Image: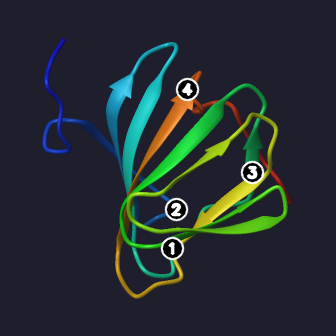
Amino acid sequence: MNIISTDKAEHYIWAEKCDGWHLAKSPNLSVIEEQVPPGGTEVKHYHTKSEQFFYMLSGIAIIEADGQIHELNTNQGLHIPAGIQHQLRNNSDENIRFLVISTPPSHGDRVIVS
């Protein structure tokens, strides 16, 4: 067991301008800190096996889940069960930072909705 931070975590870029840091990565659990710049968005998708919990560290995110719009402010979270279509976006003029906790890990379990 090691103490982890974004300084030492595995980093990746998604949607060409969004950042992700793997804080915990095991066969049963994924904890990722992500940063999305103003105007950033992910594609609408769902996971067949993974359930996720989004928790805002700073800023305001818009998450559309199962056709409902949710505005998540700092220190608020939203649970998204497996099979629910969802999409996160940053409509603000500031970066947003949040945690995405997935069990099992969601990488390789994403189905894009067209």
The residue at which mark 4 appears reads as 105
Mark toward the start of the polypeptide (3 vs 4): 3
Taking 17 as reference, is 54 left or right? right
Is the residue 88 above or below the residue 110 in the image?
below
Mark toward the start of the polypeptide (1 vs 2): 2
Dot 2 falls on a residue whose secondary structure is loop
What is the crowding at mark 4: few (fewer than 14 residues within 10 Å), some, or many (at least 20)? many
The residue at which mark 3 appears reads as 45
Dot 3 falls on a residue whose secondary structure is strand
Q: Which mark is residue 11?
A: none
The amino acid type of the residue labelled 4 equals Pro
Q: Which mark is residue 40?
A: 1
Do the residues under discs 1 and 2 have CB atoms within 8 angstroms?
A: yes
Q: Residue at x 51, y 75 (%)?
A: 90
Is the residue 92 above or below the residue 11 in the image?
below
* Residue 91, percent from left and from top: 53, 82
Where is the N terminus found, in terms of image quarters? top left
What is the crowding at mark 3: few (fewer than 14 residues within 10 Å), some, or many (at least 20)? some
Q: CA distance from mark 3 to mark 2?
A: 14 Å
The residue at which mark 2 appears reads as 15
Dot 4 falls on a residue whose secondary structure is loop
Where is the C terminus found, in terms of image quarters? bottom right
Q: CA distance from mark 1 to mark 2?
A: 8 Å
